[in-house]
Amino acid sequence: MIEGAAKPRLLVLIGPTAVGKTKLSMEISKQYHCEIISGDSMQVYRGMDIGTAKASDEERRLFPHHLIDIHDPQDPFSAAEFQELVRDLIPQINERGKLPFIVGGTGLYIESVCYDFRFTKVGSDEEFRKEQDAFADLHGEEALHHKLQLVDPESAERLHYNDRRRVIRALEIAHLSGTPLSKHLEDQTKESPYELCIIGLTMDRAMLYKRIEARVDEMLEAGLVEEVRSLLASGCPKDAISMQGLGYKEIAAYLEGELTLEDATVLLKRNTRRYAKRQLSWFRHMKQINWVDLTDQTNFSVHLKKINDIITGKFVQEIEYNQQPLL
């Protein structure tokens, strides 16, 4: 960026799973002429639609969406790749006269873009990784996660124990550098290359958990079991990074005969509640978030007005929006 040049604008909507990001993002996109960039680490994978709660075909026809269905589920995708792709997308969207709008709940991915993270240059130790993999195979994912809790409790709070690859990477960074991953993240300058407007959605915890449980039931009714069965039948390995996502790991265990469907459902609901808690924990460490509480579900128009006030307050002389809501 040329010194003294205006920073490009970037609108961001974050919040835990099932809080209501998609509905609000549609309204905001209409009013501010946005192009949506998915900030969800799982929506990049093709064929993983129900379990990742992707925007519908109709929603994607109404508003441009980016970084959805760009990877085969056999191929891993990283925060560094996400950051690079979004860095390229933002100026392209701005050149079209639209407002770049990141919507999602994967904290590291979104924060890496907002504050231009420099990902750690710590190398790798293949022997160490194999040792940790073997440990997890023998003792289980939760035992491996406990090892991370001992050396880097903050990263352990943010990472799900099922996310073996990232848990091992966090252990590897601490092992090789002597410094926990959370410390590497703290040392980022967190100076944004963008004129940021970040809106965070939250609600009463008990209500959020009820919405999560209802969403899991809806996903199962919509065919989540068949989606996972199809992925496995197409050759996607059970231990692929994509298959460690919520919904996929639990249902794969059911299909492999390791759990009953009832037990898999209970586990999925529990894991999703815990994931939402970790999402909120991550967001609490981010700065410049304008929080909107959605607990009162009868006041959608009030919530939308508050969000409009936040956006126009940030981009007050620079942007216009259509006051007519999309019903």
Image (tube, rainbow, N blue to C red):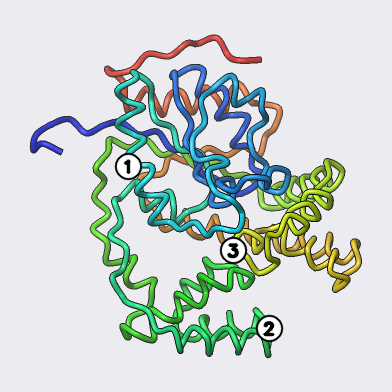
Secondary structure under tag 1 reads: helix
Q: Quadrant of the C terminus?
A: top right
Query: As displayed, is residue 250 above or below residue 314?
Result: below
Secondary structure under tag 3 reads: loop
Find disc 3 in the rendering and name its residue.
Answer: 241
Instruction: Give percent across and percent down for residue 38.
Output: 51, 40
Query: Between disc 1 and disc 2, whose residue precedes?
Result: 1
Q: Are marks 1 and 3 in contact (CB under 8 Å)?
A: no
Residue sitting nearer the eye, 124 or 214: 124
Query: Between disc 2 and disc 3, whose residue precedes?
Result: 2
Real-space Cα separation, disc 1 to disc 2, in angstroms: 37 Å
Q: Nearer the viewer, mark 2 or mark 3?
A: 3
Find disc 1 in the rendering and name its residue.
Answer: 87
Name which quarter of the figure residue 264 lies in.
bottom right
Q: Residue at x 26, y 46 (%)?
A: 192
Real-space Cα separation, disc 1 to disc 3, in angstroms: 24 Å
Q: Residue at x 68, y 83 (%)?
A: 140
Amino acid under disc 1? Arg
Find disc 2 in the rendering and name its residue.
Answer: 140
Amino acid under disc 2? Gly
Query: As displayed, is residue 52 above or below residue 164?
Result: above
Amino acid under disc 3? Ile
Q: Residue at x 51, y 18 (%)?
A: 30
Residue sitting nearer the eye, 186 or 147: 147
Instruction: Give percent across and percent down for residue 268.
Output: 76, 60
Q: Are marks 1 and 2 in contact (CB under 8 Å)?
A: no
